């Protein structure tokens, strides 16, 4: 009795350790929506799209800020004995006197006094100057350049946001294929398991018939070969399940060693209504097309920016200065003014810039036209494929029923000695194939329905 209690006592920690290990290695179960959110949080394309939006928002702030006055503060130190600058600095410091003009060298009795070069004026001592400046500049008119930059930045921002929508919908589509790929691979595995069980039953039945002298040994050997082939197919199906899970791991950014489980299969509802309605909606709201249209708008704004150099520019300036021969803030002065400039000739530089901007805009417009035709084809093709996939599912369901009934009849005929082992194995293979075809048809139906939603710009995590 003591030995039993001691053994139980020793086993308790081991059992607890096993329970802890089992808990820590339990697979994380994600439903489709959770898988989508996980992928969206770490997908590189989504991260890139987010940074593009941030860049575009910053560009909008930058271009809008160009309308505001620019205020700069500066502090400059200068030492010079250059005659012109030294005299000018003395004037700025309010320190100039008559001796700076060489007044002491002026002799009225000298008939050539006006030809005398004043030494102190031409060869002044070095002058120190400390200048503090506060300056404000305000553009009044730039020929539409600032407005063009603002329009361009806003168009790029709209394009970036549409690009983010497109990237998110593409991630949803990729997750759907990977997520449902796990279920499809498992369905293939189940089909292979059914085929293996059927093949084992055939071997068992034919072996009994062979021992009873009803069939020849070649029939038994054929059944055994078929069983081995089915086992190979089952191994391939098992590997396909692991490959599907690995692909989902990669898409979600999870290490392959982390256990992962999917919660439930996804139902993708068909689009209701007429193809023409969805085709028109896709051309208007497809995020990829919307992004391209905004890029065309940005290119048109770039043309406006290039044309701005054909028009005059006007602005205001206000400046406050202090100048001192020591570090200080004496000798205050202010300057206010306005400027109007107009470039009349530049050798064709502006015209070249305009033509280049127009060509870039026309290129994007051509790409947009091509993309619109491509989306129209994609919508029609996805719509047709979804309808075809629905019909294929119904046909495969009927084929499975027919193949199952045919296999049951042939089994009875073979047991009665009416048919050959070749026909028996052929009907079993046909049943296995129709089951696999049904699995593929269900997967294709979901993918094509999702593809139709992607083409029309209506693909959301809830697949509604």
Image (cartoon, rainbow, N blue to C red):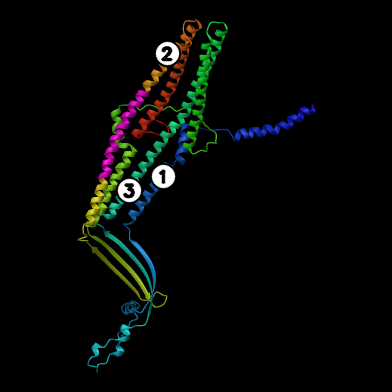
Circle 3 is placed at which residue position?
154
Q: Is residue 452 above or below residue 306?
A: above
Where disc 3 sits, the SS reads: helix
Circle 1 is placed at which residue position?
48
Where disc 1 sits, the SS reads: helix
Circle 2 is placed at which residue position?
402
Instruction: Please tell me which residue is depicted at 42% across the width and 21% down the height of the picture.
Output: 437
Q: CA distance from mark 2 to mark 1?
A: 52 Å
Q: CA distance from mark 3 to mark 1?
A: 18 Å
CA neighbours of label 3 inside 10 A, class few (<14), some (14 to 19), many (20+): many
Bounds of the magenta span? 362-389
The quarter of the image holding the N terminus is top right
Asked whether disc 3 touches disc 2, contact meaning CB atoms under 8 Å apart, the reply is: no
* Nearest to the observer: residue 463 or residue 382: 382
The quarter of the image holding the C terminus is top left
Sequence-first disc among 2 and 1: 1
């Amino acid at each position: 009795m003591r030995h039993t209690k001691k053994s139980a006592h020793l086993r308790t920690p081991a059992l607890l350790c096993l329970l802890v290990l089992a808990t820590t290695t339990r697979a994380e179960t994600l439903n489709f929506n959770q898988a989508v959110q996980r992928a969206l949080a770490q997908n590189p394309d989504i991260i890139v799209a987010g940074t593009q939006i941030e860049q575009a928002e910053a560009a909008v702030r930058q271009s809008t800020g160009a309308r505001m006055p620019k205020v700069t503060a500066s502090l400059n130190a200068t030492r010079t004995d250059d005659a012109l600058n030294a005299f000018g600095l003395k004037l700025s410091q309010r320190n100039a006197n008559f001796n700076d003009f060489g007044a002491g060298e002026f002799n009225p009795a000298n008939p050539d006094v006006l030809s005398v070069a004043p030494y102190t004026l031409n060869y002044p001592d070095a002058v120190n100057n400390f200048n503090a400046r506060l300056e404000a500049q305000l553009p009044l008119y730039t020929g539409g350049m600032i407005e063009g930059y603002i329009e361009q930045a806003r168009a790029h921002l709209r394009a970036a946001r549409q690009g983010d929508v497109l990237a998110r919908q593409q991630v949803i589509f990729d997750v759907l294929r990977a997520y449902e790929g796990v279920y499809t691979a498992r369905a293939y595995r189940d089909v292979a398991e059914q085929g293996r069980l059927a093949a084992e039953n055939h071997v068992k039945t034919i072996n009994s018939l062979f021992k009873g002298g009803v069939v020849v040994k070649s029939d038994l050997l054929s059944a055994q070969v078929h069983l081995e082939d089915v086992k190979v197919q089952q191994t391939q199906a098992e590997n396909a399940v692991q490959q599907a899970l690995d692909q989902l791991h990669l898409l979600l950014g999870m290490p392959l060693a982390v256990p992962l489980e999917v919660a439930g299969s996804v139902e993708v509802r068909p689009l209701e209504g007429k193809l023409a309605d969805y085709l028109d909606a896709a051309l208007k709201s497809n995020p990829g097309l919307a992004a391209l249209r905004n890029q065309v708008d940005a290119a048109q704004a770039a043309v406006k920016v290039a044309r701005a150099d054909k028009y005059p520019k006007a602005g205001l300036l206000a400046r406050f200065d202090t100048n001192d021969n020591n570090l200080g803030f004496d000798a205050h002065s202010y300057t206010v003014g306005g400027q109007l400039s107009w470039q009349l000739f530049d050798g064709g530089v502006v015209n070249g810039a305009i033509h280049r901007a127009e060509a870039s805009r026309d290129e994007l417009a051509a790409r947009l036209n091509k993309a619109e035709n491509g989306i129209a084809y994609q919508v029609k093709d996805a719509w047709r494929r979804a309808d075809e996939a629905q019909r294929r599912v119904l046909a495969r369901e009927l084929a499975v029923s027919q193949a199952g009934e045919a296999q049951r009849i042939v089994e009875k005929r073979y047991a009665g000695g009416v048919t050959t082992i070749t026909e028996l194995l052929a009907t079993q293979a046909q049943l296995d194939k129709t089951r696999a075809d049904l699995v593929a048809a269900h997967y294709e139906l979901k993918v094509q329905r999702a593809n139709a939603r992607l083409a029309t710009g209506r693909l959301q995590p809830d697949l509604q």
